[in-house]
Amino acid sequence: MADCPRLQKCPFFNDQLDDMPDLSGAVKALFCKKNYRNCARYNIAKQLGPQNVPNNLFPADGRQANELLKKHKVQK
Ligand code: SF4
């Protein structure tokens, strides 16, 4: 699969999170360069807008992403 379309602006990919994981290189290879459609950050940005992506949200944090999406739907 292709690179994530958010690579250039993504705080995670550009090492701008306060708490970058030690294995961020592996996470980037797995999500950002391969399976970006499975990335929690990508999915929140796509569905709620980039301004609604929590700074500390990790790509593999699908559970937190689903909770955010549920909350957003409830508030509508
Ligand atoms: S896959 Fe996720 S973490 Fe990687 S650049 Fe895209 S939005 Fe950012």
Image (cartoon, rainbow, N blue to C red):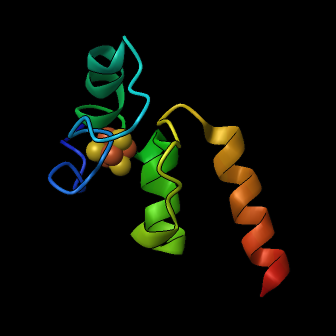
- In this view, the residue farthest toward the bottom is 76
Picture quadrant of residue 51: bottom left
Picture quadrant of residue 6: bottom left
Q: Quadrant of ligand 1?
A: top left
Say how many tags the image has. Answer: 0
The C terminus sits in image quarter: bottom right
User: What residue is drawn where x is 52% and y is 60%?
Assistant: 44
User: What residue is drawn where x is 22% and y is 56%?
Assistant: 5
The N terminus sits in image quarter: top left
Apparent side of residue 2 relative to residue 65 in the rendered image (left or right): left
Whether residue 31 is situated above or below residue 74 in the rendered picture: above
Apparent side of residue 19 relative to residue 31 in the rendered image (left or right): right
- In this view, the residue farthest toward the left is 8
Q: Nearer the viewer, residue 12 or 60?
A: 12
Whether residue 22 is situated above or below residue 71 in the rendered picture: above
User: What residue is drawn where x is 18% and y is 42%?
Assistant: 3
Apparent side of residue 24 relative to residue 42 in the rendered image (left or right): left
- In this view, the residue farthest toward the right is 74
Query: Where does the image place residue 31, in percent across and percent down from the top left?
Result: 35, 32
Query: Where does the image place residue 26, in percent across and percent down from the top left?
Result: 31, 15
Whether residue 53 is situated above or below residue 4 in the rendered picture: below
Query: Where does the image place residue 30, in percent across and percent down from the top left?
Result: 34, 23
